Image: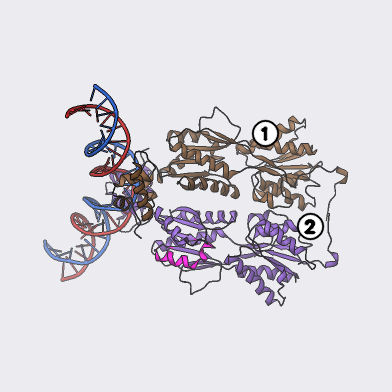
Chain colours: A purple, B brown, C blue, D red
Amino acid sequence: MGAVTLDDVAGRARVSAKTVSRVVNGERSVRPETRQRVLRAIEQLDYRPNLLARGLSGSHAYTIGLVYDNPNAYYILSMQQGALAACDALNFGLQMRPCNSRSPGLAEELRDFVQRSRLSGLVLTTPVSERVAALHRLAAYHIPFVRILSAARDPRDEFPCVYVDDRDAAYAITSHLLQLGHARIGFLRGGKHHHASAERLKGYKDALRDYGVPLRKELVVDGDYVFDDGFRGARRLLDLAEPPTAIFGCNDEIAAGALAAAQSAGLQVPYDVSIAGFEDSPFSRHSWPPLTTARQRADIIVEHATRMLIARIGGGEVDNEAFNPELVVRGSTAPPRSKSRRRKRR
Amino acid sequence: MGAVTLDDVAGRARVSAKTVSRVVNGERSVRPETRQRVLRAIEQLDYRPNLLARGLSGSHAYTIGLVYDNPNAYYILSMQQGALAACDALNFGLQMRPCNSRSPGLAEELRDFVQRSRLSGLVLTTPVSERVAALHRLAAYHIPFVRILSAARDPRDEFPCVYVDDRDAAYAITSHLLQLGHARIGFLRGGKHHHASAERLKGYKDALRDYGVPLRKELVVDGDYVFDDGFRGARRLLDLAEPPTAIFGCNDEIAAGALAAAQSAGLQVPYDVSIAGFEDSPFSRHSWPPLTTARQRADIIVEHATRMLIARIGGGEVDNEAFNPELVVRGSTAPPRSKSRRRKRR
DNA sequence: GCGTAGAATGACAGCGCTGTCATCGGCGCT
DNA sequence: AGCGCCGATGACAGCGCTGTCATTCTACGC
């Protein structure tokens, strides 16, 4: 099993182990010719640093943790892929960490997690990134982190941040529906305590206001980020005496539920009712009709956040960044048909 | 930051560090009263072992790798969840490792991966688990692994294995369609080089044979495990002079493509054409109509494989296990309607 | 040619744990 | 009483790397 170690390389290159370490870690103050010799030895021996030893010895393990608390499988995986891409490129390891963002001991759980493996830092995704008290505790423990937040850029933020302006995107989707001529637009909320959900509702309300369309309480239905709630919520909306001509689901899974509810009621989408989602998950592309939605590249966002984190760990100062989801118009939205022509099938 | 170490606990419990180590690792030969004292100290100090140190010092890192090469995001995530469940329960770490199963240096890549982090072992999922030559090399490197294989249990297998009998499940789905009265059943293949895909095709053929229905070459269409191939393949089938009355997609994503193709052609599912998938992914539940499919609990299967692996690492002998996917009948399949009554909408 | 700053390199300890082997004590046996 | 044996415990080295600090080398100015 004899894995090649620093010492082996050092012997071959006729330098000390420390110098090899310097080369491996790209430190300055190694003469180019020495560096060459070391690199050659590394290649000849096919040396790979032992990450455990490096982590144990150094001040941190060159590994970051991705912290999430989200029921949405697809979302988690995109985030993981983004984080993995950044980590692979920068030679860091990645640990996934599900958690309960509402737990009172959140900060301490995360501290233990970091200490056990000497993690270099954490990427905090929503809704974990919204627990401000926990963030302060983490900062007090000197744990580097970058958070991803559903909000507009805010210069007063004291913690490094990648912003995703969900309000803006929800505004765009609602505007799109309004411009198509819809005046009664249903809104299916997700995650009650989830800040992103509130932002999306805000975008919806703001758009209605700006277009001079009154907000109707009965068109906003609570629920969670899951299919069944989308189905039930849409059913409720469609059963109203005056049903909406369009429904905006707070994420794609909710919209999928709404789509199924409409179709099971014999309505044709988008002719009888328009449906829009939020997320650009595979479902939105694979359903029929494909969903109009907001493209949110969770992978790219998290990759960026990961790079920011690693840069900070390396001592750099990094500027916050904002990513705005963009409107993707697909087949599930169209102008409303006049009520008289609405028809039931089957 | 001062994390609590073994020595701290040892000092408090008035024993040596080694004894604390024994208690932590559940070794015998510690007097119960000593053990109690140590446990109390651990609790009082809230001690957590440093995984890096343990891994560096011990013969392995109490961490396993989950190796995959699969384009299906949902599948990967379920597997990850299963592995995480087992690892959490048994106090192991988990590293995810995507790879190219067709790379000639596969075994060496994996060896490097294992050595870098001193991994305890690997769980190999399909199609990586099918590369027999690589498996032999891994075994020669003394790397423990458990593989998950799409096949019927085979006592001649020399490597530990969790079997998933895809042929059987595909047989069940095809039988279901045949029993409904379908005689022309289209089959959309996935991953050309993927053994599981061949097994599913086999199940399809076997069922046809057993029901005395001739196999029609033109009803079997090649493609990959992706939506677009399902869409295109189904289009091709539906455009035949004598189109099939049912289509069986090799996984849910392919079936989703077929569903979209049928609906975009104005066909009503399942009245005009039945569609079945394979996998029981969320899509199959969230589409309209929901898909008849084969339930494959990737999470449970991988959790089991992970437990097997960890048991083996601990020196135990473990028996191979087989999981058979089960047929899940939903709304996308129904008896064929007579051809004359078939109608186009829109 | 000499002194010296600053760059290049090396020696060494130690990160927190486990494997190995030595040690200690108590018990049962002759 | 003396012996051996085994269970319980501890001392110590070392896993492979990095941080710190000491040492050596180089180049430049006078």
Magenta region, residue range = A124-144
Give me the disc on residue A140: none
Label 1: few (<14), some (14–19) or many (≥20) C-alpha neighbours in 10 Å:
some
Q: Are marks 1 and 2 in contact (CB under 8 Å)?
A: no
Q: Chain of mark 2?
A: A
Q: Which is nearer the eye, C28 or A43?
A: C28
Residue A224: quarter of image: bottom right
Q: Which is nearer the eye, B77 or A22?
A: B77
Give how far across and how far down residue B290 sits, in percent. 72, 49
Give how far across and how far down residue C24 sits, in percent. 22, 39
Residue type, label 2:
Ala
Q: Is residue A8 left or right of residue B313?
A: left
Q: Which residue is mark 1?
A: B202
Give how far across and how far down residue A87 sits, in percent. 46, 55
Residue type, label 1:
Lys
Q: Which is nearer the eye, A278 or B33?
A: B33
> For numbered disc 1, what is the local secondary structure?
helix
Q: Tell me the distance, in whole angstroms, between the alpha carbons under discs 1 and 2.
A: 38 Å
Q: Is residue A203 left or right of residue A180?
A: left
